[in-house]
Amino acid sequence: MTALSFILWEARPEIWPDGPVPLRWYGLMFAAAFALGQYIISYIFKRDGKAEKDVDSLTYHMILGTVLGARLGHCLFYQPDYYLSHPIEILKVWEGGLASHGATIGIIFAMWLYSRKHPSQSWLWILDRIVIVVALGGAFVRFGNLMNSEIIGKPADQPWCMVFLQPFENILRESESGKIDHFSFTKQDGETLLDNISYKKLSLKIVFKPNGIDEVQAETFASIALPAFISNSNGDEEHLRLISGQKPKVFTDGAGQTVLEMDILGLPRHPAMVYESISNFLLFIFLFMIWKKNKDLPEGMLFSLFVIFLFSLRFFYEFLKENQVDFEDGLALNMGQNLSIPMVLAGLFLLWRSLKSTEKKIN
């Protein structure tokens, strides 16, 4: 494996970063998940002989169950002390903080409410259909997480692992937009092993605006501002590190602009959100094909398969991911794994129950 076998991930969360409307990929993916989900559910209802007019009501229940469940799940599972002390903060969904386990519980409860209003569609019957689009929605949302550079994994050395540059680049743009014309990262051939972790060599080039700063000021920027920006961008997860003793190359180009070039180290990590996005999409195809090829499936079977596969994979993916909150560091299994275990057990029980009911019908 060569030192260049990794991915530099520089995607920005905004669809049009410099446009007049701050549309973000995450919001688009979230909306697209519900829009496409409604289309697929309409197709399912039509094929199963159910009234298509009920799809709108189902979608409303689905949206409320997902958003409220995901938000409350994050607040109560991961930061209960803070949010119970500051309950108004729970309403600030736009600031981030959604939990898939909470979303699952919210959807289950919302579908129970929906089924009570539509007696011809039992709770398990509707859950069997809704999880098909939930799996697809999960793939969309995890793609949105990728565009936000969030839910990242632990350091690793596989060729598909990513150095996430967005946190640092965001700080550089926000703090120095008046001085910097543009900047770029490029891969370099070389790596450094620190604490048994492989750091990859990168080259950072910053071109300052004409008449912005001179060479002396650029050297001061490299020695004072740049280390602070890297430290702040790393936060709880390290992405970049300065090379000890590294001196920047500073010069003035032909256009009269001051240029700063220096090598730094990047830390590749598992793109955990990509793993989950792909898994969710494959789960969607799996569930959809089972539903399409089997008209007389026992109630609860598709839902149980969804829960078993989704949360079994989630349990194992958590070994590749960084913990979300500090208290998880003291746990044998993190919160995501502890929440996944009862979900899988419930799914196994429901699968056994649905298979048992099939045996009784055959006998």
Image (cartoon, rainbow, N blue to C red):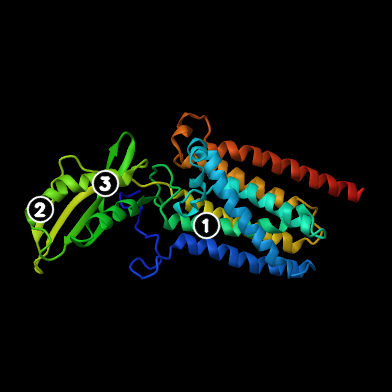
Labels 3 and 2: the sequence-earlier one:
2
Task: Please tell me whether mark 3 sits on a helix, a strand or a loop.
Answer: helix
Q: How many marks?
A: 3
Give the Cα separation between the discs numbered 3 and 2. 18 Å
Mark 3 belongs to which amino acid? Ile
Neighbour class for label 1 at 10 Å: few (<14), some, many (≥20)? many
Q: Which residue lies under the disc numbered 1? A: 141
Which of the two marks, 3 or 2, is nearer to us in this view?
2
Q: Quadrant of residue 133?
A: bottom right
- Asked if residue 336 is positioned above or below residue 293 in the image, the reply reads above
Front-most of 85 and 173?
Answer: 85
What mark, if any, has residue 152 been given in the picture? none
**Residue 300, relative to residue 35: is it above or below?**
above
Mark 3 lies on residue? 230
> Which of the marked residues, 1 or 3, is nearer the chain's N terminus?
1
Disc 1 marks a residue whose amino acid type is: Val
Query: Residue 320 placed where, x, y %?
Result: 47, 42
Mark whose residue sits in front, 2 or 1 = 2
Q: CA distance from mark 2 to mark 1?
A: 43 Å
Query: Which is nearer the N-term, disc 2 or disc 1?
Result: 1
Q: Residues within 10 Å of mark 2 (few under 14, many from 20)?
A: few
Q: Residue 243 occupies which quadrant of the picture? A: top left
Residue tagged 2: 217
